[in-house]
Amino acid sequence: MTFPHRHVLEDYIVGFEGTPNPHHLAVVKRPAVLSVLARSGREGDALSVLGRIEAGSARFAGPGEWLLVSEDASASSIARELTAAGDDVLHFTDQSDGRVVLRLAGPSVRKILAKCLAVDVHPDEFVVGASTPTQCCHVAANLARTGENTFELIVPRSFAGHVFEEIMEMGREYAMTAGFA
C-alpha cells in the first residue's frame, strides 16, 4: 500500500493568500534533517566532514552536535556521504519525518521573533550563518539566521501546529502571510 505524503501543517496553511507579503512564513515542504553527533575528541573532524557536504547546511545544536538541513538533497544521499566518514568520526540519525522547518522573512522579522524567542537576534549578536538551540513559544527549537532578514526555525513535528499558530499571531500586526516554500 502506498501512502501519499501529507505535511503536518497542510491544514494550517489552507486559506492563506497566495501572494506573500514582505513578512512571510514559508514552510519547507520536504526537507532532509539529520542529527549528527561527533565522537568524543573528533568534533573538528566531524565539522570538517559537514563542511564538505555542499547540499546541506550544518546548524549548531550543542557541543559536538549539529542538525544537517537540506532542501535540495534527500536524506539518503546525505546519509551516504556521512557514512563515508566512518563510525570513528561521527554518528547520525535521519530526523526528517520528525522535524518541521519554518522560514521567516521580512524587514521586521526580528521584532516578530523577539516576542516568542529566548535568544537575542540583534544583527550584531546573531550574525548571518549563526545557529543555536533555543525555545520558541515554549517549544525546543533550533534557530538559524540564513539571510539579512531571514531566519529558519526547526521544531519537532508534534509541536509544529502550535508554533505555526503562535508565530502567525505574533506577525499579525505586520500582515504576515504563510505558505509552502
Image (tube, helix red, strand yellow):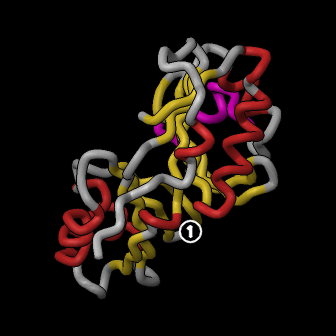
Which quarter of the figure is the C terminus placed in? top left
Residue 27, image x, y percentages: 50, 40
Q: Which residue is mark 1?
A: 63
Q: Is residue 128 visible?
A: no
Tell me the element at label 1. loop
Instruction: Decide if residue 44 is on the left or right side of residue 143.
Output: left
Instruction: Decide if residue 162 is on the left or right side of residue 106.
Output: right
Question: Is residue 132 placed above or below 177 in the rendered structure?
Answer: below
Instruction: Decide if residue 134 is on the left or right side of residue 131.
Output: right
Q: Is residue 84 magenta?
A: no
Q: Is residue 126 visible?
A: yes
Residue at position x 56%, y 35% from top? 14
What span is colored magenta in the figure? 120-130
Q: Main secondary structure of the magenta part?
A: loop
Residue 108, image x, y percentages: 68, 17
Question: Is residue 92 placed above or below 133 in the rendered structure?
Answer: below
Front residue of 148/29: it is: 29
Residue at position x 62%, y 35% from top? 126
Residue at position x 29%, y 64% from top? 75
At label 1, which amino acid type do we have? Pro
